[in-house]
Amino acid sequence: MNLRWAPVMLLGLAAVSAHAVPTFAEVRAAHRSSDVTLLDRRGEPLQTVRVDRTVRRLDWVPLKAISPALLQAIVLSEDRRFYEHSGVDWSAVAQSAWANLWNTRTRGASTLTMQLAGLLDEGLARPAGGRSVGQKVGQAYTATRLDARWKKSEILEAYLNLAAFRGELVGIGALSQTLFGKHPSGLDVQEAAIAASLLRGPNAGPDTVAKRACGVLQLQQQSCTGVVSLAASALVRRGGPALGEQLAPHYARQLALVPGPAVKTSLDARTQRFARDTLRRHLASLTARNVEDGAVLVLDNRTGEVRAWVGSSGDLSDAAQVDGVVARRQPGSTLKPFIYELAFERRLLSPSSLIDDSPAEISTPTGLYLPQNYDRQFKGWVSARTALGASLNVPAVRVGALLGPDALVARLNALGLDLPHDGGHYGPALALGGADVTLMALTNAYRALANGGMYAPVPTAQRPAAPKRVADPAAVFLVTDILADNTARARTFGLDSSLVTKGFAAAKTGTSKDMRDNWCIGFTDRYTVGVWVGNASGEAMHQVSGTSGAAPVWQAVMRYLHDGHPSVRGPAPAGVVAERVHPDGEPVRDDWFLAGMQPGGVALPPPAQQRFGITTPRQGSIYALDPDIPPAAQRVAFEGERGTWWLDGRRIGHGEKLSWAPWPGRHELRLLGPGGRVVQAVTFEVRGASLKPTKR
């Protein structure tokens, strides 16, 4: 056959390929990655998530982002006259026998443009048994049309993004990052030669690939030293670590992702990276104390948008896949601010009200509850400001008992904590965090405090919910002021704790039973930050408190967020007044009150000490009757907060104090509050078999 007439033959057979040739822009726009790239709020890559398991194809790589060494290796290996021919290399065809003209195994017969034609049109793709004559003609014809309409640079760029290199790897982006752990722009001459050789035999063994790569290197007058070991090590990396940025893997799980363009999120990549690295560094320093897990969440106060979501400590943990942001754990003392806020709101207390921090025995359906403070010491009468700031347990339980567990559950659920049981299930322990919550829900509940009692769920892909009022802004202000008062917490934490920041910040720590969980949640004028530290397994930590576990991370993140922009305290809302007080045993200070609850003057004595529950007798008390003392002289005092007293099922009086003539036996004493609510119940015993009659 006279090959001079081959182009004429192709034109005559143009009808064989009736498919329209797409433009370069159309091909690039139709490209779909097997992974979705999550972008932060500024457009910076944040996380790469694979959503298509049938193929591995990453984002389109422009020609300018591909190593020159690779471009040279591809052209030398696949199509040396690429920049000279018009889609079909007729010079190479003339050097081959007609039987091998369309055999892609013969270098130079099938050009890059012809191979691209097969990639663009499935009908022109090479089947396992080889192409038919019609397919070969159609492929060549399409190649000439591509060359006429596309730039050479566009043909090369499209080919490198669409070609299958090895196994499931399609495109130079997936190949480069999977086999060599780098972007295509960083491939050196040997890596480029290996990549080029894979186009000839995608499933070839390491020795064959290395031999072909060495041939490409020799064409470039480069050394083959080390290419055998490099090929062997590269080809075993299939199925290795995830590709692309991996800053927020746990956050990505919350999104319903499908193949398509990059997805913009509310996260801030810089804040995410800082929070992740800070958590990891701090947990590494606590390894000797049996701590390996943690989580950090940063919310924007105004919008509720997530700025950082760190679900775990990564490779420091044996449970790195567990997301600490949404896992339920016991929150410890971080529930106390909501208890005091509700008590302030109901005008049962003010920040200067005195509460008895002394041993308490509270009867529950499951047994006797004896709350203890963190340091196992009791402070006596303290103000509510000190009780909350210093995180004293017994006062919190007393205030919780005053409110009742059902009221607490209702308020916590209104704040989004979604407790699965009613108040009776939790009992008095709810005041000290005896319910499982998530870091997400707890941090967002604190955001409601930051917003003056307005609650809204953290927005999702759906339309954000409108905020609603769940707490009184004046009462929220009182609690916020206490949480920001470094003097109020000094009694427990000192004046230089990890809760101290340069600007305004309100914060609370918490430690669950047996030191299984550490928390620090707090907010400024712009952000709410929650930190959890512990072990996903539930194993206890060793000598790690809220201020040494979670608080240092919280403090570091807050300082980062407000670097150059100090947080500012907001004004007091309507209904709040300030007045100087002289609390018993505490420094003179200006304190805040709900209007109408202030003492009324500068020099007034401290407010009366308020009783909570039954103060006398205590649970299990034993009274011994003396037969030598007249019965009329032997009385037992019942003392406690004002209420109705019932003894052994009979009403015996009302008030704060009653006097009772003892009678031998076991007795049950109940104190009922408003509405017949049982404030507390105790049992005690009176011993004495007989009494002498009273002498007249």
Image (cartoon, rainbow, N blue to C red):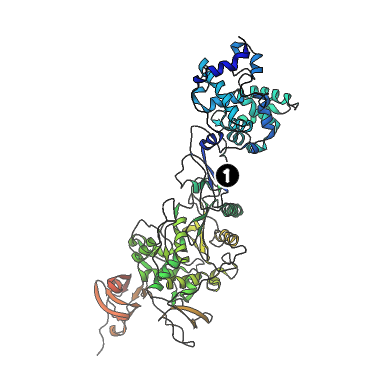
Give the residue number, with chain letter if any, for mark 1.
245
Q: Position of residue 202 (x, y in %)?
A: 58, 25
Query: Against 301, is 473 above or below?
Result: below
Query: Against 141, is 680 above or below?
Result: below
Badge 1: residue crowd in 10 Å (few <14, some 14–19, many ≥20) = some
Q: Position of residue 365 (x, y in %)?
A: 32, 62
Query: Against 129, is 76 above or below?
Result: below
> In this orientation, which residue lies closer to the viewer: 5 or 247?
5
In the rendered view, does 386 fall on the left or right side of 184? left
* Quadrant of the drawing holding the N terminus: top right
| Residue type at numbered disc 1 | Glu
Q: Position of residue 253 (x, y in %)?
A: 47, 46
Q: Position of residue 684 (x, y in %)?
A: 33, 71
Inspect this view and state whether residue 258 appears: yes
> In this orientation, which residue lies closer to the viewer: 492 or 243?
243
In the rendered view, does 675 fall on the left or right side of 8? left
* Quadrant of the drawing holding the C terminus: bottom left
Specify the quadrant of the image occupied by residue 454: bottom left
